[in-house]
Image (cartoon, rainbow, N blue to C red):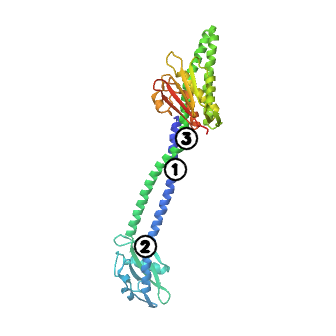
Amino acid sequence: MTNRSAADRLRRLRWVLTLVFVAANATGLLVFAWLSIASDSERGEQRLDGELRRVTSVVMRLVQAPGPDVVVTAYIRDDEINKECPQFAVLSGDSDAIAPYFSERRCVRMDDTVLGGLARDAVDSGKILTGFTRATDGRLVRVAAEPFRVSSGQYAGAVVAVSDAEPEQDRHDRMVLFVVLGCVVAVGGLGLFGHWLSGRAIRPAAAALEQQEVLLAETAHDLRTPVAALRALAESALRNPNERVELLPRTVRLAVRMGSIIDGLLVRARLAAGVDRLALQPVWLDQLVAGVVDETPTDGASVTLTAAPTKVHVDPTLVQRAIGNLLDNALRYGRQPDQQAIVHISVAGGRVTVADHGPGVDESLAEDVERFHTGSSGKAGSTGLGLSIVRWVAQAHGGSLVVYNAEDAGAIFVLVLPVLD
């Protein structure tokens, strides 16, 4: 059984959503197309029947029946309808009762026996009959047969009108072709729109998956070094029992560092999952930063602070962690080889700027702060979990994290937070 990654499953889900969207809309579109075609066909038949009924009605008024078996058609010859299309014929329901009469103009060639059969059917049913049939040359025609009564009250014959249905059929065929092509184009458009829409639908899941993968990679990287160091200290303590007292403080520091990494991971994960909410409140940012600087061990490094009173609307715990991560990153990586770190922090206008004198950040990171890569050091293309949390805290508060290199040396990180008016 093939194991699919989460990204593969998301891509598969996107295609499934696209197919479902297209199938549902295409079904409705096809039903609408079928109804449109059927309605157009019915309207076409109604137009033909209306023209035929006009002819039969006029001819019925011109036909005279003075006796039980007498039908006079002489008045038809003088009417213009005798020379127009659709053509017509006055036929008997009984072949010997009434002499047949055919209009002067023959628009289509019809078999007289077919017309006679239609007249007999109309006389027998006593109803107006309509339908399609074929001319002698194979053309499609529409016919209507309307029976008439003689003086005795019995149906004796019928007026049969014939109309060429080919033009109407050609128009209907063009309409069908237009509808079919329109459906094809619409289904294609629905496919593209559905694919785009499904992409937007799964975008939050894809973003969460990407954040999870980045978070796991950064966590693995940040834990790899202290875990390896902790293992090395443990092995050294096993081999050299006399050095255990000296190794214990270092072991404790590594354990504290690992705990801080895991704690930061849990905080970020819980907030991202919505388990915890931001505890927003007015905070004097300059005092909060001063507290972080006072509580952070510098190990001989030079840390200076310039702060102006600034009140922000933030979660103080998260912002304190973010500033601590920035300071820790500068102390850890913001120095030249074999020299102590030099860090300057300034606070003003809702901005916390942390500048160091290290080798600087990778140019790709400086150009695109949204891309945090994991590497061998915090200044050579990696920011690790610490700065990733800083960026996330800034975004959670509606702020941002800006990263760039100083002109002379070092990196500058600017944390921007919303100022409280």
The kind of secondary structure element at disc 3 is helix
Residue annotated with mark 3: 204
Amino acid type at mark 2: Leu
Q: Where does residue 132 sit, x and y in percent of width and height? A: 42, 71
Residue annotated with mark 1: 21
Choose top left, top right, bottom left or bottom right for residue 395: top right
Alpha carbon of mark 3 to alpha carbon of mark 1: how far?
19 Å
Residue annotated with mark 2: 48
Q: Where does residue 366 sit, x and y in percent of width and height? A: 47, 30
Which is nearer the N-term, disc 3 or disc 2?
A: 2
Which is nearer the N-term, disc 2 or disc 1?
A: 1
Choose top left, top right, bottom left or bottom right for residue 175: bottom left
Alpha carbon of mark 2 to alpha carbon of mark 1: how far?
41 Å
Alpha carbon of mark 3 to alpha carbon of mark 2: how far?
58 Å
Tell which residue pokes out farthest to the top in this image: 242
Is residue 17 in view from this perspective?
yes
